[in-house]
Amino acid sequence: MAHLSFQLDYHAACGQQICICGSVAELGGFDEGKALPLANSGSLWRAELEVESAGTLQYYYFVRENSANVRREWGGYRELNLVEGKSFFVSDNWKNAPAHQYLYSSVFTDSVFARPMVSHTAYPAQALLLNVACPYVGKNQKLVICGENPALGAWDLGKALPLDYVRAGEWEILLDASVFEADTPYKFVIVDAENACALHWEDGDNRVLHTDFVSQGRNGVQVQMGLEFCYADFEYRGIGTAIPVFSLRSEDSFGIGDFIDLKKMIDWVACTHQQIIQLLPINDTTTSRTWRDSYPYSAISIYALHPIYLNCKSLPLKEKSRFQIYLEKAKALNALPSVDYEAVLRLKTDYSRDLFEDNGVETLSSTAYKAFFESNKEWLFPYACFCYLRDGNRSARFADWGEFAKYDKGRLVRMLDRNAEASRETGYHCYLQFLLHEQLSDVKDYAHAKGVALKGDIPIGIHRYSVDAWTNTALFNMDTQTGAPPDDFSLYGQNWGFPTYNWAAMEGENYAWWKSRFRKMADYFDAYRIDHILGFFRIWEIPHDAVQGLLGHFKPALPYGGEEIAQAGIPFDEQKMAQAFIYERFLPEIFGQYAEEVKYSYLNLSDFGRCELKSFCDTQQKIKRLFEGRNDEKSDCIRKGLYALCCEMLFVCDGVGQNRFHPRITAQYTHAFQCLNDDEKTAFNRLYDEFFYRRHNDFWRSQALKKLPELISSTSMMVCGEDLGMVPECVPAVMRELQILSLEIQRMPKTAGTRFSDLKRLPYLSVCTTSSHDMSPIRAWWLENRDDTQYYYNEMLGHDGVAPTDCTPNLCEEIIANHLCSNAMWVILPWQDWLSIDENLRRANPEDERINLPSDPENYWRYRMHISLEELLGQTDFNEKIKELGGQLRIAN
């Protein structure tokens, strides 16, 4: 039996009740309905109780109002080790979200600042236990307490007492209270672990150690819980490298980078004193088994890892001669300058099947596999069934993916479970996922041991015909598509083809699908990038029959009614303004010499020269199918022109609300707009600007704040958001409020009217980079636009004269040095740009360094390092140069 006395200082509003909930029955057993209410006197809330069981007590506080729980403390549970027969007098402070919340992410707690944890289980008769939140202590540092009393060193740092690291960002020290006869001034100090020199005395006045209960002759443990180390101007600055797994190259690779190759990449990052590796998505994308599956943002499972990333060499076959044959084939693929996706996938599939023949039964019977299956069965078995049917449609002869998606899932799963062939096949896919899980988990542990964190990437969408859409159909709007409006990447917008999310259904299940997705991500990563975070505010929804993004609209949104448009000064006519506006006189400008042929072959003519597209080509998808395989100049011209005719409108229909309309994005470039008079053009532009830049700010803010806090609090990973493109005004404020790191790219400034961002004025809570996978690296960018290059050379780099034709190694180093001096918390650079500073190491042709062209939906994702990781690790001078660059510039800044 242990006696507990709690006291919390909290200014509650009238009618609010503070409750304490915890792991023992006396505190509700984590059932908030059975939590213990505290009695209050002013701002002090108190409770006393006897607890029958000793051991670790976990607890937290929350606020109840009108029978509803309206607020909970930030962060994890408080912990206190109880001892039989002891009395504990606990003084608590309410835990608000800290200003440096990111320091409690696993990037820091498990990697960059990681250290062993201890706990206190033995107490003197009169004990003082101080618990302090101090997440600022680096690996080669320690936290000490120094004070006036000789027991605390008499203000001599050499005699100060060290605190023990007990939990993420939390430290404790247990003192014998009997040696303190009077109240004692003290402070916490961060010191160098080697020489005990002070690195930071905490800000503010001295603390006072009160020992009232000692003078009163009471025995027990006085606990000061949740003290906060004061360090107002703390700033961490880290460095990292961005590279896709498929781009890695080692001497052990099978023609593509794999999970075990990451260990050598971790070695390089560690030896150059970097702290993080950023990857592209690594989930299974296999649908066609062609190079089109190389697109990493179209996963067929949000959980399953891509089998192509299995390291085969570390899993040798029993038959040595057969193993050698595979090694020879792998060597040939590994010698290629880029990834041959189809050949690599065939080779690895064959190898993994032979491996399954070798030890599949044994592995599936192992304790480790059974534990893995039990933890992942909710997604793993449906995924395995899905893969079985995909690979040849064996038992169910589906004509296409659409029919497959409609098939009754429950009956299908039962059928596969009873079928011997199917059972073997599903076992194979589960086996493969287990091997991938084992390898990547090992990589994560290896990274942590080296002080390196792994940062993953969460795509905004899923493949339309994925196992997730199959098993959770109600969560997706399968009759729409996801994309992005026109931007610097694509003149016609982007159509990713993913179904949009049914957020109402997701909210109804408390975002369980998303939380599960994030938690699975946390198995392998310490940080993640939310691809297109704008989608959590609003998404660009495109009709299912469109190809381009121009006919999309934001969802959710507040579309205009016809009367509202008319009142704005535009004589609204749905037929003329919200349907294809095609007149014969436009055709020569669009189709040139083919105008007459188009008029008679593809259009129906009506009165006054107005036309409409014939029924066989009245949507972009119909037009795409019509011209499939026709790549000559004439077909290309007509196809693009017909696409344009489909978009000839000023407004697009909402699709849900009757008589509700959205201004068509970039409608000012249409003939429909040119036919308006000047007053109508002015009115349209005013309506357009109001709609896209002001009308939705509060609405979209509320949408994001319904979703994002729930999701990002489901794991301890550090959160970054890709916030490029057409960014609503409310986005930066929400990201700051939630401490989500923004993405900052100097040549994509977020301040209107500027050509390049000022690196010194970037927000601290951000990731700064020279380029992304969707952009050209430094050297290729330098060649793209001579006017931009010249301006950058003179104004941003401060050089006189004419800019060099090529971006020399010295210029690349200067650009990187400027980024390392930026105000951003993290500078994570593409691997290609790191190598650009070395004449001998960088690739001969800058264009070969590009990973993706967003304007090309048929892009082949096949970029690969041109030197091996083993060679890279051997480049001592180059690696030392990067280490010095980072050390001098990031730390000095």
Image (cartoon, helix red, strand yellow):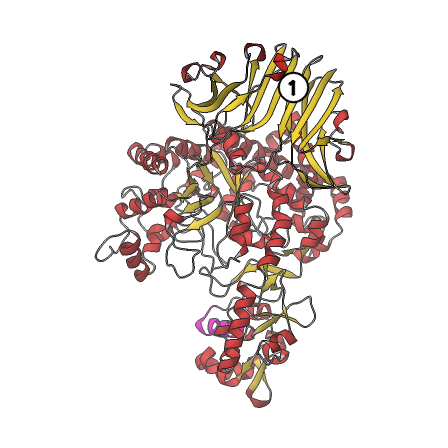
Q: Is residue 549 visible?
A: no
Nearest the camera: 356 or 489?
489
Residue 493 location in percent, x, y? 51, 63
| Magenta-colored span | 630-643
Q: Name the dominant secondary structure of the magenta segment.
A: helix
Residue ID at (62%, 50%): 705
| Disc 1 target residue | 81
Say whether residue 881 is left or right of residue 656. Answer: left
Q: Is residue 771 magenta?
A: no
- Secondary structure under tag 1 reads strand
* Left or right: 892 in relation to 50: left
Q: Residues within 10 Å of mark 1 (few under 14, many from 20)?
A: some
Q: Position of residue 824 (x, y in %)?
A: 42, 43
Amino acid type, residue under disc 1 in the picture: Asn
Q: Nearer the viewer, residue 666 or 389?
A: 666
The x, y position of residue 252, in whole percent, is 44, 34
User: Is 638 contained in the magenta span?
Assistant: yes
Asked if one can make out residue 852 in the rendered structure from this viewpoint, the answer is: yes
Measured along the vertical axis of the image, is residue 595 above or below residue 647? below
Please state if 460 lies on the left or on the right of 832 as rendered: right
